[in-house]
Amino acid sequence: MQLARLKAAKQKTVGLKQTQKALEKGLVKLVFIADDAEQHVTRPLLKLCSERDVPVEQVTTMEELGKACGIEVGAATAAIVED
């Protein structure tokens, strides 16, 4: 799993809105989506990733993704942003 890359990334987004904005600007290298996040939240982001050929890495839980981002709450999505 690429969570180690997310932890080490100098620039990343945490959360749906930040990730979506970075995707729309073409800055994202890799997106992480939690399996237990609500599908109506993640589906538009998955579609955008597909349209822009951005790879998606599934993470088991929002809690696990949040910890990888260095926050104390769960995160539905996160991304590694180009330097």
Image: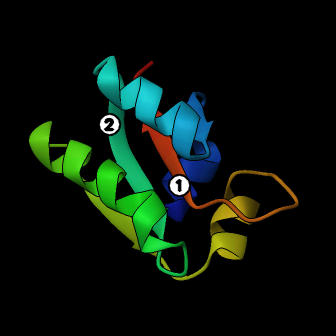
The percent coordinates of residue 2 (x first, y second) are 44, 62
Residue appearing at x 28%, y 21% in the figure: 26
Residue at the right extreme of this rendering: 72
The percent coordinates of residue 24 (x first, y second) are 32, 24
Residue appearing at x 50%, y 51% in the figure: 5
Q: Say above or below: 59 vs 53.
A: below
Answer whether residue 2 is visible to the viewer in this image.
no
Hey, which quadrant is residue 48 in on the image?
A: top left
Q: Quarter of the image containing the C terminus? A: top left
Q: Say above or below: 30 vs 1.
A: above
Hey, which quadrant is residue 76 in on the image?
A: bottom right
Answer whether residue 17 is visible to the viewer in this image.
yes
Q: Which residue is mark 2?
A: 29
Give the residue type that dot 2 points to. Answer: Lys
Of 39 and 58, the residue lying toward us = 39
Q: Is residue 67 left or right of residue 18?
A: right
Hey, which quadrant is residue 62 in on the image?
A: bottom right
- Helix, strand or loop at mark 1: strand
The reply to whether dot 1 and dot 2 touch (C-beta < 8 Å) is no
Q: Dot 1: within a 10 Å radius of its alpha carbon, few (fewer than 14), some, or many (20 or more) residues? A: many
Give the residue type that dot 1 points to. Answer: Thr
Residue appearing at x 72%, y 73% in the figure: 63
Q: Say above or below: 39 vs 48.
A: below
Q: Quarter of the image containing the N terminus? A: bottom left
- Helix, strand or loop at mark 2: strand
Q: Which residue is mark 1?
A: 77
